[in-house]
Image (cartoon, rainbow, N blue to C red):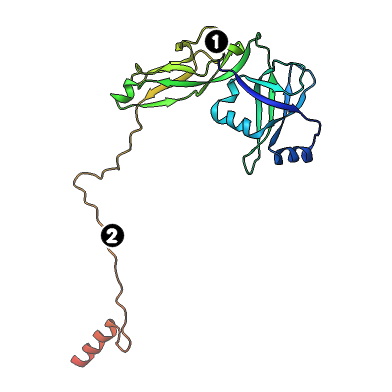
Amino acid sequence: MDEIFLEAELREGKGRASSKDLRESGYLPAVVYFHGQDALTVKVSRGALLKLVHQHRLESVIINLKIKDDKKTKGRPCLVKEIQYDPVREDIIHVDFNEISLTEAIKVNVPVQVNGEAVGVKQEGGSLEHLLWEIEVECLPTSIPKGIQVDISTLKMGDAIHIKDIAFPEGVKPLNDPDAVVLHVVAPMKEEAPAEGVEGEESKEPEVIKEKKEVPGEAPAADAAKDKDKEKK
């Protein structure tokens, strides 16, 4: 397990005004929780935290939080409990840490990492559907895996991989339903062919009966025919 360090300092001010001042000076307000004890209000470097966000998946890694003037000189092993973002600018505005014990098992979500190319996709033209992207596990903090490895190379059309089919690292216990489907290969969607007409039947366009427009100064056809009969008589 990689050891990740983050420096912090105790802070006294609280409230929106104080938090705003912190952010404008390059820091972020944060809180450290531990087993029902009084929470510690601290501040961390915004740049240092952003670097960790870009390099690691913070939800499942242990951060050794070294707080200046703290009684625990070796640091505090923590998991990120929550990162709050500004709803408009999407900047990080606050962080919550959970201090943990390295000797007590914890529950975390670990991402599924797919290896190989399924036979049902490569040779049979199927599609791979990924249903579970994370698996909840229970283990010691020092045993948290970076990812759950799943080999899909032998999957054929219609095959699936369930939680119970995966080999988990020693000391890592899955908490999801054993029958839950993680991935499966399905047949591609078929496009419906357009409806065909009855054989021998030709499509005919409806006839449009056009009325003859009257030309100014010209008598209607019916009146002209009556005049001609009168002349003959």
Three-letter code for the amino acid on which mark 1 is drawn: Val
Three-letter code for the amino acid on which mark 2 is drawn: Pro
Point out the tag, 2 or 1, that comes first from the N-terminus.
1
Q: Is residue 104 left or right of residue 10?
A: left
Image quadrant holding the N terminus, namely top right
List x then y, in percent, for residue 227. 25, 89
Q: Which of labels 2 and 1 is toward the front?
A: 1
Q: Nearer the viewer, residue 162 or 81?
A: 81
Q: Quadrant of residue 90?
A: top right
For residue 44, the mark is: none
Please, is residue 80 above or below residue 174 in the view?
below
Q: Residue at image x 69%, y 24%? A: 97
Q: Residue at image x 33%, y 37%? A: 191
Q: Nearer the viewer, residue 98 or 55?
A: 55
Q: Residue under label 2, please give it.
A: 206
For residue 172, the mark is: 1
Pointer 1 local density, CA inside 10 Å: few below 14, some 14–19, many at least 20: some
Whether residue 233 is visible here, answered yes or no, is no
Secondary structure under tag 1 reads loop
